[in-house]
Image (cartoon, rainbow, N blue to C red):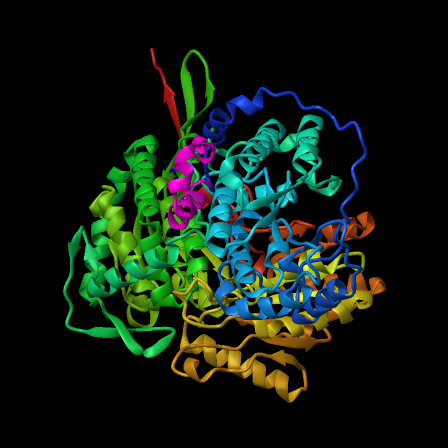
């Protein structure tokens, strides 16, 4: 990593473009403390207010487009605007394409250049500046600038905004200097302070990034602004043409002597003092527990790292075998494991355990349960925390294997593994307090104590949609509570589940207390569910199958009633009021409806739109449908992969055809020939008139739209309650009366009002439904551990 001081030294002249670009990449998550040390001299300089009023730059009042039509309107707005020859004309590239981001940039570069070229300077005296952008897309904007410099007649009038809040501000300027030298031009640099800091901070927290990619301290931002001016005024920046935004008085006077233009732009100079008080993203729970780090999807080298992991997985795939008492079992009957993105591709073999192996596994874990239950809860927590840390070490490997086997897009697989680790961290941290023995009463002659013990042997039946989160999260909860665990993985998530089980053994979770039986329910379910040694079940999947499991368990004559934690499919509903701005809500709703989230057993997306706004929302949704990238799950560009089973695919196709026969299909993405061998379902938008029409919940990339009037809210809430599948409801309204009515009438497990990112989070936003959508406490919440324990009251009475 190059020190900042080198940018002001004579050594800068010998650095090349590649070296400076690597420095640009390395500064993204530079700790604030290190930058503060490097900027020490400029930090000490006082801020002098301007003594004159500077000409003000016009603010561009456009939204980032949500569909191609709006991108066209933005282009026409720029084209028809009055071009200034006295001040820079600012153009935001993100206004010209609805998918302007680093992951899809190679696909959209030509379209962007076609839109930008007509907006370039029309004379040698006008200047066009590419507007400020968030750090995740800064590299893309630099690539775009490089292309424009190579292709325009007035390349010396094309510049870029640089924010001093960016930790990469100085490395960016250094790279731009070398680019200008290579292209033999001078690049205008509009130096400003900040724009949209709050969304970038929130994104870093939600994504669990290692640090914030921007500075949040007003003093540090000001210090870097001054350091940038020092660089721009040095012999190392002769190919850059500075334009200063709201400079302090001493820098304005310097700019005046250098002939640099200065302007005022209040919208680029606001810095909230509250941002500086925030802890780092990975430390927000530091007093209670660890937090799993996330991935910045645009970070350099991530795609190559995924490809390397995939090659390693392909060369090291072993048959999925049963494990009893830490020993691999052999079996004569093997079945193929096929990839969901190509059913002709066999990616592994799975053994089918025999009845004798199933019985032996249950005997083994039952015998070991008592010893594990008597192990102090702190020791159990430590073992399982070691397991969670191993999963964190193998984050990329597990996500790659999950995407390869189940078809979940890699960016969502990375999120699932992170969620799983956080669940394990959470339960390991709260278990010692929640499961500790409690003294109820004591006096001179007696002590009354409440003890919490594991119930016995739990059977885990995770789904193919979220196998890592379920096995790591729910499995940790069951084990830390003192239970033994038998894992029966989903058939098309067997490879991933086997790898997790190996890590569990590697973490020294006692091999006697866990067993792995990779068979389907139709193959080994009868032997498991009729056995009296099963004391509890964790199941996620189809509601019909959950009911069958409950019936089989209840059919054991004389057996105790046991807890069964069922999380099955449910309605993920949204109500949007007429007062809501479309740009705030629709991008996220589209991501959820047509991404891996639509594949979860817990989700089937229905949006209620108030009549006054329905037309605009529906039009934007339909126009956005072609932008959804359906494809290979290991590509970072993929939004939507295949579904998880042929049963699910057939159900979705049947549902679409039923709706087509009724004339309800509003839009449907064309199927591609390259997807014919995979379990792909095209994103589809369907019109409903009432939720009662949706008799069956089939998770998948189908978005249902229902219109309603304000006086029909009671009917809407009755419809939702009538389904019984009360998973989640997100309501977007600023009307307090409507909020109050919905809060008190609707029956769902998760109710969110105007939440920008209602994403499940361990300890902060637990998830679970009501009725058929879920039984028992919510996953990720403090009461979930109660599902796995039984109580015993012990009285010690002293005689004599």
Residue 64 x, y percent position in the rendering? 67, 59
Residue positioned most to the bottom:
661
> Which of 541 and 304 lies nearest the eye of the viewer?
304
Above or below, 687 against 503 in this view is below
Residue 292 x, y percent position in the rendering? 42, 42
Can see residue 721? no
The quarter of the picture where the C terminus appears is top left
> Which of 547 and 336 lies nearest the eye of the viewer?
336
> Which of 184 and 470 lies nearest the eye of the viewer?
184
Residue 312 x, y percent position in the rendering? 24, 60
Magenta extent: 2-27
Residue 325 x, y percent position in the rendering? 18, 51
Above or below, 726 against 191 in this view is below
The quarter of the picture where the N terminus appears is top left
Number of numbered markers: 0
Horizontal side of 2 relative to 70 (left or right) equals left
- Is residue 488 a member of the stretch shown in magenta? no
Can see residue 221? yes
Above or below, 248 against 183 in this view is above
């Amino acid at each position: 990593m190059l020190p900042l001081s080198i940018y002001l030294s004579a050594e800068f002249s010998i650095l090349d473009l590649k070296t400076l670009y690597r420095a640009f990449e390395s500064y993204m998550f530079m700790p604030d403390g290190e930058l503060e040390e490097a900027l020490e001299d400029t930090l000490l300089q006082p801020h002098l207010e301007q003594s004159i009023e500077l000409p003000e730059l016009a603010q561009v009042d456009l939204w980032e487009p949500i569909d191609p039509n709006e991108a066209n309107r933005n282009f026409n707005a720029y084209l028809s605007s009055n071009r200034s020859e006295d001040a820079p004309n600012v153009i935001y590239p993100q206004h010209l394409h609805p998918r302007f981001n680093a992951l899809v940039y190679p696909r959209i570069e030509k379209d962007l250049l076609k839109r930008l070229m007509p907006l370039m300077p029309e004379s040698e005296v006008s200047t066009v500046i590419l507007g400020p952008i968030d750090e995740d897309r800064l590299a893309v904007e630099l690539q775009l600038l490089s292309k424009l410099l190579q292709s325009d007649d007035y390349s010396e009038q094309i510049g870029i905004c640089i924010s001093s809040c960016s930790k990469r501000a100085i490395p960016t300027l250094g790279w731009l200097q070398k680019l200008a030298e290579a292209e033999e031009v001078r690049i205008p640099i509009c130096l400003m302070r900040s724009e949209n800091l709050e969304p970038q901070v929130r994104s870093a927290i939600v994504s669990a990034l290692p640090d914030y990619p921007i500075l949040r301290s007003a003093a540090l931002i000001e210090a870097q602004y001054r350091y940038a001016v020092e660089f721009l005024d040095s012999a190392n920046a002769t190919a850059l043409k500075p334009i200063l935004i709201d400079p302090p008085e001493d820098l304005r006077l310097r700019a005046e002597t250098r002939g640099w233009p200065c302007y005022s732009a209040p919208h680029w100079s606001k810095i909230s003092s509250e941002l500086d008080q925030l802890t780092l993203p990975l430390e927000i729970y530091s007093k209670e527990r660890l937090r799993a780090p996330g991935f910045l999807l645009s970070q350099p080298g991530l795609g190559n790292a995924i490809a390397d992991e995939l090659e390693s997985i392909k060369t090291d795939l072993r048959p999925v075998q049963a494990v009893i008492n830490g020993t691999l079992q052999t079996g004569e009957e093997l079945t193929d494991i096929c990839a969901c993105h190509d059913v002709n591709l066999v990616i592994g073999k799975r053994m089918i355990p025999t009845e004798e192996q199933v019985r032996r596994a249950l005997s083994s874990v039952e015998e070991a349960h008592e010893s594990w239950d008597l192990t102090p809860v702190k020791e159990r927590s430590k073992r399982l925390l070691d397991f969670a840390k191993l999963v964190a070490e193998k984050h990329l490997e597990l996500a790659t294997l999950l995407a390869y086997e189940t078809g979940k897009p890699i960016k969502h697989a990375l999120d699932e593994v992170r969620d799983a680790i956080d669940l394990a961290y959470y339960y390991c941290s709260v278990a010692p307090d929640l499961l500790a023995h409690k003294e109820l009463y004591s006096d001179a002659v007696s002590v009354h104590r409440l003890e919490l013990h594991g119930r016995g042997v739990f059977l885990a039946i995770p789904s193919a949609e979220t196998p890592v989160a379920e096995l790591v999260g729910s499995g940790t909860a069951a084990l830390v509570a003192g239970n033994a665990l038998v894992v029966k993985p989903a058939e098309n998530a067997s490879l991933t589940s086997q790898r997790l089980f190996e890590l569990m053994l590697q973490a020294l979770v006692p091999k006697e207390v866990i067993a792995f039986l990779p068979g389907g329910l139709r193959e080994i379910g009868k032997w498991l569910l009729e056995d009296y040694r099963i004391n509890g079940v964790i199941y996620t999947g189809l509601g019909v199958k959950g009911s069958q499991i409950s019936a089989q368990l209840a059919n054991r004559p004389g057996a105790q009633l046991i807890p069964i934690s069922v999380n099955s499919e449910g309605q993920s509903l949204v109500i949007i009021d007429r007062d809501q701005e479309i740009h705030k809500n629709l991008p996220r709703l589209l991501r959820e409806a047509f991404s891996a989230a639509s594949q979860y057993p817990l989700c089937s997306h229905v949006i209620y739109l108030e009549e006054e706004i329905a037309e605009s929302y529906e039009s934007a949704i339909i126009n956005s449908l072609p932008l959804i990238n359906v494809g290979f799950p290991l590509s970072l560009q993929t939004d939507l992969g295949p579904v998880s089973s042929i049963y699910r695919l057939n159900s979705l196709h049947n549902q679409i055809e039923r709706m087509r026969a009724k004339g309800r299909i509003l839009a449907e993405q064309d199927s591609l020939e390259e997807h014919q061998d995979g379990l792909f379902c095209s994103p589809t938008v369907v019109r409903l008139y009432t939720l009662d029409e949706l008799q069956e919940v089939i998770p998948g990339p189908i978005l249902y739209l229902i219109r309603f009037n304000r006086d029909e809210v009671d009917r809407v809430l009755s419809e939702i309650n009538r389904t019984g599948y009360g998973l989640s409801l997100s309501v977007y309204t600023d009307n307090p009366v409507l909020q109050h009515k919905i809060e008190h009438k609707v029956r769902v497990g998760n109710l969110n009002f105007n939440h920008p990112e209602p994403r499940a989070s361990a300890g902060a936003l637990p998830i679970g439904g009501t009725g058929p959508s879920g039984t028992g406490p919510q996953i990720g919440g403090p009461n979930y551990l109660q599902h796995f324990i039984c109580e015993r009251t012990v009285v010690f009475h002293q005689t004599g």
